[in-house]
């Protein structure tokens, strides 16, 4: 079996190639522009395969720019030709859409015919249905539908080219709006619902999550994750006797736009929208007798798409990075029937997951990888551009996202953690976006290894401008269960305290020579609130706080300063073993990374939460009351299964679950 794939360095194409590599045999020939060869080579290295063969060409050239000799050598050997390359952008202009979507498809068909390919697989779109109203099944195509934009028109015309040619057998796939991987959140660009995310972030940062907002019923939309699209295409392409058919890769249940927005708002921790006047109101009674064109929802959508509406949206939502064209085409007037696809996939285990099950995954990936607010922040760029930032624990969680944000602002992250492979993945992500990063694997609980690390860093790098002590070990275990586990205290002190100060002390000579340097210690709200069961962890963080407070007065004259961040509970791999936290309010690694960026930009002595400050004051002015509250928490929150030595999935919450959730919400961010 042999394959030819266009658009393999793009989003859907990349996932399709991975499916072919995982589940099929034979070579996968990949069309690639010469300028994109380095990017493809990095992808091949990550796939760890010799089966992907680059074929230099260009979507805008005749026969896709593929060399005649290559065509002659491979004629009759390509079983499946996947044409994935296209413009998937509602904001692209008419000329770009025409060149890529229509002419690109025309030349792809010509190449497939020249190769005598077994089957031509066209990735179309439900946009080909245009403004068709009502039921639209997989056997429908030319229904006289209005095509409201260059994107809709060219997706229709490119599919028409495939259907009208008679040389190569074909199959057509019409995905809905494609979002990131439902398992990892991976997405390559801001598109579709992602345009709403900056607005959601702004709402989260300015308003309480419980505050209801008034929204409008904008109709129904349809989103599917890219992993479903790729898996479905791979399966459908290899079914016998299905040539000449189209397949809808959609969610069988239409999703209200307002509902989709609210799912992502919930994932972000932002306020949600209520729609007091929705279609149940506007289609009931006398309004239901009105022609569809003059019903409130139709009039609203028409006003959004009008020239005046587009200009208003450009000057309002456009300032938040939401193109007016996207809002105008977020909802669909058609309802897409996918029964043919569902029947073809029956028994394969391939299906569309509920958006609620992976919305937080998509949001977290966007917040860490695609949110460009740090790069647009003038203060962040002024503070970090051209600076070298040593970040420990940079392979995941807070450290990884901090590294991505530093690179976005023009800085150079110096990535330190024990696992080299994960550090290399972070460096690759930074380099893919045009940044630079250095990788220094090191076990930060090994003091001699830290000495070698600091010598290597100061020798190989021109400067050390910032140090972020983020790596840490957390242990949640009561003293009662720690009687024969003194090593818990030794291990936390070794990494959280001795490792951190050894690193700083090793880098101090270089910072003294520079007459500048800033150290950011990622501490814990626990230092201020003293929650039970964290005696080993909180003590180690308190020790680092105290050491930094003392040496700060000694080093300020050398231009070296310190910031301690008393971080609230963060949703990171470190807290994953404590299943109790799955139900607790937490901040995301990206929110925590924003605090680290703020520490480097503003250089305050401390960054605290309101609750953390309240806890510190309570321990000072009414310590007995504070200890009584903490003892109540000690009784309500049991030791975890892991703390008791049970490595199973986790203990049940027990009869006091409601009390646990109440305390977790009242004392938001505290490590219970």
Image: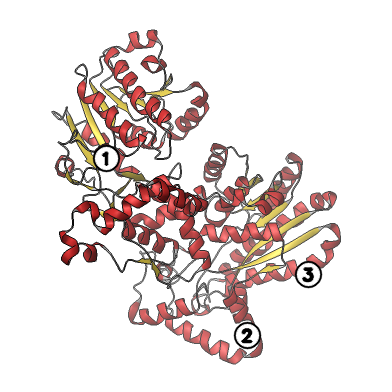
Where does the image place residue 633, in percent across and percent down from the top left?
47, 83
Where does the image place residue 209, in percent across and percent down from the top left?
44, 70
Q: Residue at x 82, y 57 (%)?
A: 559
According to the picture, the residue beneath numbered tag 1 turns out to be 130
Q: Are marks 3 and 2 in contact (CB under 8 Å)?
A: no
Residue 15 seen in render = yes
Give the left or right position of residue 496, taking residue 126 as reference.
Answer: right
Q: How is the image coloured?
A: secondary structure
Give the left or right position of residue 158, taking residue 244 as reference.
Answer: right
- Disc 2 crowd rating (10 Å Cα; few below 14, some 14-19, many 20+) is some
What numbered label is drawn on residue 402? none
Q: Residue at x 61, y 86 (%)?
A: 618
- Disc 3 crowd rating (10 Å Cα; few below 14, some 14-19, many 20+) is few
Where does the image place residue 356, in percent across and percent down from the top left?
32, 59
Determine the secondary structure under disc 3: helix
Give the left or right position of residue 428, taking residue 312 as reference.
Answer: right
Q: Nearer the viewer, residue 308 or 39?
A: 308
According to the picture, the residue beneath numbered tag 2 turns out to be 619
Tag nearer the camera, 3 or 1: 1
Compared with residue 634, is residue 519 higher up or lower down, i.e. above or below?
A: above
According to the picture, the residue beneath numbered tag 3 turns out to be 550
Q: Nearer the viewer, residue 382 or 470?
A: 382
N-terminal-most mark, 3 or 1: 1
Q: Residue at x 48, y 80 (%)?
A: 666
Residue 183 seen in render = no
Compared with residue 411, is residue 545 higher up or lower down, i.e. above or below?
A: below
Residues at marks 3 and 1, CA–CA distance in whole angstroms? 67 Å
Determine the secondary structure under disc 2: helix
Residues at marks 2 and 1, CA–CA distance in whole angstroms? 64 Å
């Amino acid at each position: 079996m042999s394959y030819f794939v266009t658009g393999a360095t793009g989003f859907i194409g990349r996932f399709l190639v991975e499916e072919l590599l995982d589940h099929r045999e034979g070579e996968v020939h990949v069309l690639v522009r010469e300028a994109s060869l380095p990017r493809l080579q990095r992808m091949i290295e990550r796939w760890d395969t010799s089966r992907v063969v680059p074929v230099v060409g260009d979507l805008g050239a005749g026969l896709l720019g593929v060399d005649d000799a290559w065509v002659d050598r491979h004629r009759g050997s390509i079983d499946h030709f996947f044409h994935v390359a296209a413009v998937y952008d509602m904001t692209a202009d008419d000329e770009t859409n025409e060149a890529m979507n229509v002419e690109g498809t025309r030349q792809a068909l010509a190449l497939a015919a020249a190769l005598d390919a077994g089957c031509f697989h066209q990735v179309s779109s439900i946009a080909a249905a245009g403004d068709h109203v009502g039921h639209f099944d997989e056997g429908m195509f030319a229904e006289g539908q209005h095509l409201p934009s260059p994107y809709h028109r060219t997706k229709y015309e490119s599919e028409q080219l495939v259907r009208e040619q008679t040389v190569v057998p074909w199959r057509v796939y019409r995905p809905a709006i494609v979002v990131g991987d439902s398992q990892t959140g991976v997405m390559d660009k801001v598109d579709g619902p992602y345009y709403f995310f900056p607005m959601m972030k702004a709402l989260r940062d300015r308003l309480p999550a419980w505050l209801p907002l008034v929204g409008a019923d904008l109709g129904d939309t349809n989103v599917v994750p890219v992993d479903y699209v790729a898996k479905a295409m791979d399966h459908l392409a290899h079914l016998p006797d299905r040539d000449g058919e189209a397949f809808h890769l959609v969610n069988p249940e239409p999703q209200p736009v307002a509902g989709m927005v609210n799912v992502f708002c919930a994932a972000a921790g932002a306020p949600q929208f209520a729609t007091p006047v929705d279609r149940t109101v506007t289609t009931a009674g006398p309004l239901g007798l009105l022609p569809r064109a003059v019903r409130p929802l139709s009039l609203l959508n028409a006003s959004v798409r009008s020239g005046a509406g587009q200009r208003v949206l450009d000057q309002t939502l456009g300032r938040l990075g939401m193109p007016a064209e996207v809002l105008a085409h977020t909802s669909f007037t058609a309802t897409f029937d996918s029964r043919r696809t569902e029947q073809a996939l029956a028994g394969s285990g391939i299906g569309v997951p509920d958006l609620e099950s992976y919305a937080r995954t998509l949001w977290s990936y966007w917040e860490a990888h695609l949110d460009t607010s740090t790069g647009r922040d003038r203060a962040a760029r002024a503070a970090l551009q051209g600076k070298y930032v040593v970040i420990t624990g940079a392979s995941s969680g807070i450290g990884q996202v901090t590294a991505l944000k530093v690179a976005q602002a023009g800085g150079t992250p110096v990535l330190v953690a024990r696992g080299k492979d994960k550090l290399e993945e972070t460096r690759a992500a930074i380099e893919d976006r045009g940044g630079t990063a250095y990788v220094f694997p090191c076990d930060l609980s090994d003091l001699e290894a830290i000495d070698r690390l600091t010598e290597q860093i100061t020798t190989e790098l021109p400067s050390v401008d910032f140090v972020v002590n983020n790596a840490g070990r957390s242990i949640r275990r009561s003293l009662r269960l720690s009687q024969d586990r003194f090593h818990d205290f030794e291990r936390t002190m070794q990494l959280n305290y001795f490792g951190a100060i050894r690193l700083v002390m090793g880098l101090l000579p270089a910072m003294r020579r520079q007459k500048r340097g800033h150290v950011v210690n990622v501490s814990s709200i626990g230092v201020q609130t003293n929650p039970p069961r964290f005696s080993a962890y909180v003590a180690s963080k308190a020790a680092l706080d105290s050491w930094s407070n003392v040496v700060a007065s000694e080093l300020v004259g050398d231009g070296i300063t310190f910031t301690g961040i008393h971080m609230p509970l963060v949703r990171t791999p470190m807290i994953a073993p404590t299943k109790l936290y799955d139900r607790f309010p937490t901040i995301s690694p990206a929110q925590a990374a924003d605090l680290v960026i703020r520490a480097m930009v503003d250089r305050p002595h401390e960054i605290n939460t309101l609750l953390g400050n309240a806890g510190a004051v309570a321990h000072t002015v009414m310590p007995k009351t504070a200890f009584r509250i903490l003892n109540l928490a000690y009784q309500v929150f049991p030791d975890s299964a892991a703390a008791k030595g049970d490595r199973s999935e986790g203990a049940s919450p027990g009869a006091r679950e409601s009390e646990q959730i109440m305390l977790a919400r009242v004392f938001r961010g505290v490590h219970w």
